[in-house]
Amino acid sequence: AGRLLSYSATPLERARRLRDSAALEAATGNELAARERLASAHELDQSDQETLAGYSALLVKQGDDDAAAVLLTRVLPQLPPPTDRRVRAAMWQRLGEVRERLRDVRGAASAFERVLEFDPDRAPLRAMLLERYGEDPAYEAQAAAHRRIVLEHDPLNLPCLSAQERLERRAGRTGRADVLAQLHAVATSLAGQGALPPSVGDPPAPPPLSDSERLLLDHPEAVVLSEVFAALYEGLPPDQLADLAALGVDSSMRVSAMSGGVAATVFAEVARFVGNRRTALYLKPGLVAPLLVVRPPTAIVLSPELAARPRAELRFLVGRALWLVRPEHALVIGLTRQRLNSMLMSIVHAFHPRHAAARATSDAEGQRLRKILPYKVVRRLTDLFQREVDTAFSSARWRRGVEHSANRAALAACRDFTAAARVLHDEGDDAALVELARFALSDAYLGLLDRIV
């Protein structure tokens, strides 16, 4: 390496040779020579990330924090975009730690913020910054941004919910603060620190959702196959789906919208809210969960016990049911999981362009569907798959996305996260509860809440 340094070379090549020589000097314990080599290499090529990383690390190792701080503060912001973001994050971390030792608290915090720009997954560092910022108004914007990121991953994080609620109340945004208070109460209960709180009351019926607002309630996974299954639902022979008689329900159990009872009133209000006026309500004793009839005319069947739950919880149950009987969602309820998976596979084989060559030998179910479905449905399915030729389809993900969408619509209908949490927790679906908490913190839901409250 020493001989190579004696030969002439371009500045960049010489910088590389100096860096290699420095590594050898450091490996043999000659840190003074290594430092000189790295300083020279850095002067020749100040944009080289590897040289800066080695040089600053050696300065820190030698205890020269002042020199390391000056070097990194001057050069790091000027470097070109990195090829390895983790290396860049490590250097900002080094600068933050150096400034900590030099008792430059603000400088350290600024460097740590840059670490998270390059490596957002450093959760412990984010938590440390949040603890350090506390309630300091000087760091209010940074703390709020970090809390949003933490809550995106962990929407029931108690410290973040509590701090964000105080911030919203100070800003006079009481509606948003109330949502955070509800989430905090549920999170406290789930952490084993008390029972689930009661629902907050019975707010007035919300105005109907607009078309654009209804779109906000759809989970992304529910959208992927919505048109496919809406078309399939339209063309599927009715005898493929259960009717009221198959569920042991008759006309004597129907609840009139004019009856004036709590169940009828809540049903009418929520149906108007979600834009579903064609579904009927029935009461049948002995049910532990609502029954949904997706074969037209659609219906929802409750037991008197379910109808007697607190109004907010009843709104949630009814809102979820009314969302699930929509044409694009109905087959989640109307078909068993196995039948739904099989039907999607057959539909893909029968209509997807990539299966065109093998269509003659494709499964019999796919061929049968092409024959029994109305021509306009066949044409629509063909067009849909042509348009979504590169989309990956999963009935399991779609089913779960539809369930999440229905929970979102139900939450908007009752506007009470504690009521929604009670229902989902009673059903043993805490994963859905967490996903719904994430939605409750979203701008989509909070913006909708601002309008309908």
Image: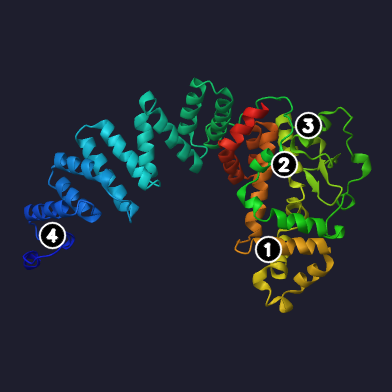
Question: Does residue 138 appear left or right of residue 382 in this picture?
Answer: left
Gap between marks 2 and 3 measured at Cα: 13 Å
> What residue is disc 3 on?
269
Question: Does residue 197 appear left or right of residue 29 in this picture?
Answer: right
Q: Which amino acid does label 4 sit on?
A: Leu
> Which image quadrant: the C terminus?
top right
> What residue is disc 4 on?
18
Residue 133, above or below 439: above
Q: Which amino acid does label 3 sit on?
A: Glu
> What residue is disc 1 on?
385
Gap between marks 1 and 4 measured at Cα: 59 Å
Please tell me the numbered disc located at residue 403: none
Residue at (22, 45) in percent of width and height = 75
Q: Are marks 2 and 3 in contact (CB under 8 Å)?
A: no
**Quick one: label 3 or label 4, which is nearer the N terminus?**
4
> What residue is disc 2 on?
320
**Quick one: label 1 or label 3, which is nearer the N terminus?**
3
**In this view, the mark in front (3 or 4):** 4
Q: What element carries label 3?
A: helix
Could you classify mark 3 by the number of other residues whose Cα lies within 10 Å: few (under 14), some (14-19), or many (20 or more)?
many
Residue 378 in view here? yes
Percent across and percent down for residue 83 are 33, 56
Percent across and percent down for residue 312 are 70, 30
**In this view, the mark in front (2 or 4):** 4
**Quick one: label 2 or label 3, which is nearer the N terminus?**
3
Q: What residue type is labelled 2?
A: Arg
| Residue 396 picture quarter | bottom right
